Amino acid sequence: MTDMPGLVLPAYFSYYKSPVKMAETPGGGIRAWRLSHDSGGWEPADDLVEEILGAVGGEISSLTVDSFIQWTEHDRGRYLRGDGPVFALYETISAIVEGAQAEGRRMTTTELALVRGIRRKTFVMFEEELQRAGDPAADPSLADGSGAV
C-alpha cells in the first residue's frame, strides 16, 4: 500500500479542516489517525487513507510537520476546555489573538512568533500526556523534528 510514488511517510494532511497523520505499519501498510475535537487525542482513520491520497486538493491538502503541529494546537485550543498548564497556555494564545482582533489589526511578527512557539510547546505537553495514557498515535518528538508517527 505504501508503494505510491512520491509518498513519504510519515505524512500530514488537512482533511476538511481536521489534522490527519499517516505512518507506515511494520507490515508495509499505512495507518492513519485524525484529531478528535472531543478529546484532543488521535482516532483511527484508516478509512480515509485512499480518499486523502487520491484526492489531495480542495478540502484535502498536504501539511508540513510544523503546519500540522500549528493546526493541531489551533484546534485543541479552540475545541477543548480544562485546567492545568496546557490550558493556561491555550488561554494565553487566545488573549494574544483576540487582542489583535479587538484592535482591528493583524498580529505583529513578534506575536506570531510567540503564538507559534507556545503551540509547539503545548503540542509536546499534550502529546506526552496522550503517550502516558496509551494513545498509540501520540508523538511528542514531532516538535523537535525527530517524529516517528
Image: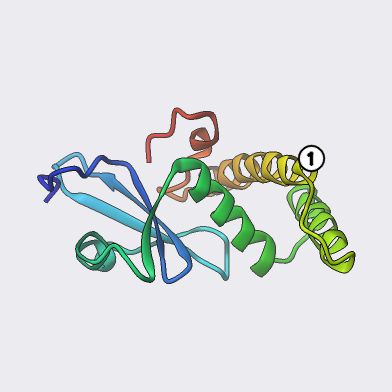
Q: Is residue 86 left or right of residue 42?
A: right
Q: Is residue 40 left or right of residue 16?
A: right
Image vertical order of residue 108 relative to residue 38, above or below: above
Q: How many marks?
A: 1
Image vertical order of residue 52 relative to residue 131, above or below: below
- Residue at 58% in and 50% down: 70
Q: Which residue is mark 1?
A: 110
Q: Residues within 10 Å of mark 1 (few under 14, many from 20)?
A: few
- Residue at 84% in and 67% down: 104
| Image location (x, y in percent) of residue 85 | 79, 47
Q: Is residue 103 left or right of residue 138?
A: right
Helix or strand or loop: what does disc 1 sit on? helix
Residue type at mark 1? Thr
- Residue at 46% in and 51% down: 135
Q: How is the image coloured?
A: rainbow
Q: Is residue 96 left or right of residue 41?
A: right
| Image location (x, y in percent) of residue 37 | 56, 69
| Image location (x, y in percent) of residue 103 | 89, 64
Judging depth in this view, the residue of 103 and 60 nearest the camera is 103
Quadrant containing the C terminus in the rendered view: top left
| Image location (x, y in percent) of residue 74 | 63, 58
- Residue at 47% in and 66% down: 18
Tell me where residue 7 sits by quadrant.
top left
